[in-house]
Amino acid sequence: SLNQFEGLIVAWIFELTKMNRSGTGYKMCKHIAKALQTCSTAIRNALDYYNAVACTLSPPCQMLKLEEVVEYAFLTDFDLLRNS
């Protein structure tokens, strides 16, 4: 589950990178924006699932907020999530 979550974040970062490339046309930007929206929804769903499972463990793992996950993504600090 955590690996899938991490994969979604990495895909999201790649889509953001594509959006900021020079020479990206209007139609491609619209396509990338739609892909980002879909990816963001998947990330929120995976985060909700992770938090639901994390609180059932003994001892309970730290619950994550979307803002923290985005910060981890930009810091490329996924090792912090590994101990969860």
Image (tube, grey):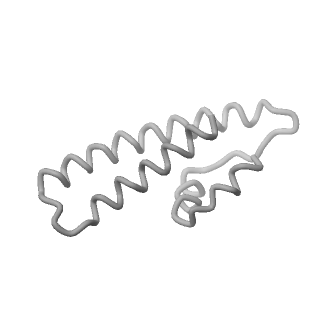
Picture mark count? 0
Q: Name the one closer to the observer, 21 or 52.
A: 21
Residue at 54% across / 58% down in the picture?
73
Q: Would you place residue 3 above or below residue 53 in this image?
A: below
Residue at 48% across / 43% down in the picture?
8
34 sits left or right of 65 in the view: left
Q: Position of residue 83 (x, y in %)?
A: 77, 49
State which quadrant residue 20 falls in: bottom left
The residue furthest bottom is: 22
Q: Position of residue 31 (x, y in %)?
A: 21, 46
Residue at 26% across / 66% down in the picture?
21
Q: Quadrant of the N terminus?
A: top right
State which quadrant residue 67 falls in: bottom right
Q: Position of residue 62 (x, y in %)?
A: 75, 47
Residue at 21% across / 69% down in the picture?
22
Q: Position of residue 43 (x, y in %)?
A: 49, 42
The residue furthest left is: 26
84 sits left or right of 21 in the view: right
Q: Name the one closer to the observer, 8 or 34.
A: 8
Q: Name the one closer to the observer, 23 or 63.
A: 23
State which quadrant residue 39 falls in: top left
